[in-house]
Each structure stands twice: as structure tokens, then as C-alpha cells.
Amino acid sequence: MGDTGNATARDGSSAITGIRNAGGSRPGPSKVAHTGDAEAAGPGSSAVTGIVNE
């Protein structure tokens, strides 16, 4: 994954400027580069600028 950024999460939502690997849907190694600009605001919100393995 190349350049990413500028994600905003508010009030219980999520912002990911990288890779979300839910249930191993992306087999093999994952790589993210040049991430940035994630913001989370409000209860239960989350922001990630990398890789989320769920």
C-alpha cells in the first residue's frame, strides 16, 4: 500500500489509513508505507495509521 492519510472518526466509528485485515482475508505479509493523518474523537472511536489484524 502506498501513500495514505486524512481519515477522521467521530462518535464510535473508526478511521484506518492503512490495512484492515479482518479474519485473515489478506494472506501473507502486509506492508504499509507513508501513512499519517488519522483522528478519532468521541467515546468508542479509534484511529489507526498502520495495520489492523482482527
Image (cartoon, rainbow, N blue to C red):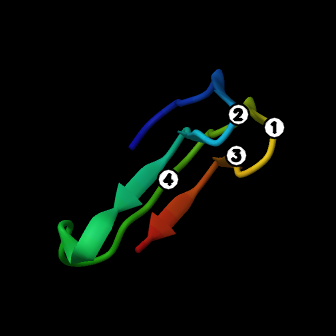
Callout 4, which amino acid? Answer: Val
Cα separation, mark 3 vs mark 1, equals 6 Å
Label 3: element kind: loop
Image quarter of the N terminus:
top left
Q: Residue at x 30, y 66 (%)?
A: 22
Label 2: element kind: loop
- Would you say the residues marked 3 and 2 are in contact, meaning their CB atoms lie under 8 Å apart? yes
Q: Quadrant of residue 29?
A: bottom left
Task: Estimate how packed mark 3 is, as few (under 14), some (14 to 19) or many (20 or more) residues with alpha carbons within 10 Å.
Answer: some
Q: Position of residue 33 (x, y in %)?
A: 55, 47
- Would you say the residues marked 2 and 1 are in contact, meaning their CB atoms lie under 8 Å apart? yes
30 with respect to 43 (left or right): left
Q: What residue is shown with label 1?
A: 42
- Would you say the residues marked 3 and 1 are in contact, meaning their CB atoms lie under 8 Å apart? yes
35 with respect to 20 (left or right): right
Q: Residue at x 74, y 29 (%)?
A: 37
Cα separation, mark 3 vs mark 2, equals 6 Å
Cα separation, mark 3 vs mark 4, equals 22 Å
Q: Nearer the viewer, mark 3 or mark 4?
A: 3
Cα separation, mark 2 vs mark 1, equals 4 Å
Task: Estimate how packed mark 1 is, as few (under 14), some (14 to 19) or many (20 or more) residues with alpha carbons within 10 Å.
Answer: few
Q: What residue is shown with label 4?
A: 32
Callout 2, which amino acid? Answer: Asp
Q: Which mark is residue 20?
A: none
Q: What residue is shown with label 2?
A: 11
Callout 3, which amino acid? Answer: Ser
Q: Is residue 21 above or below residue 16?
A: below
Q: Earlier in the sequence, mark 1 or mark 4?
A: 4
Q: Earlier in the sequence, mark 2 or mark 4?
A: 2
30 with respect to 11 (left or right): left
Q: What residue is shown with label 3?
A: 45
Label 4: element kind: loop
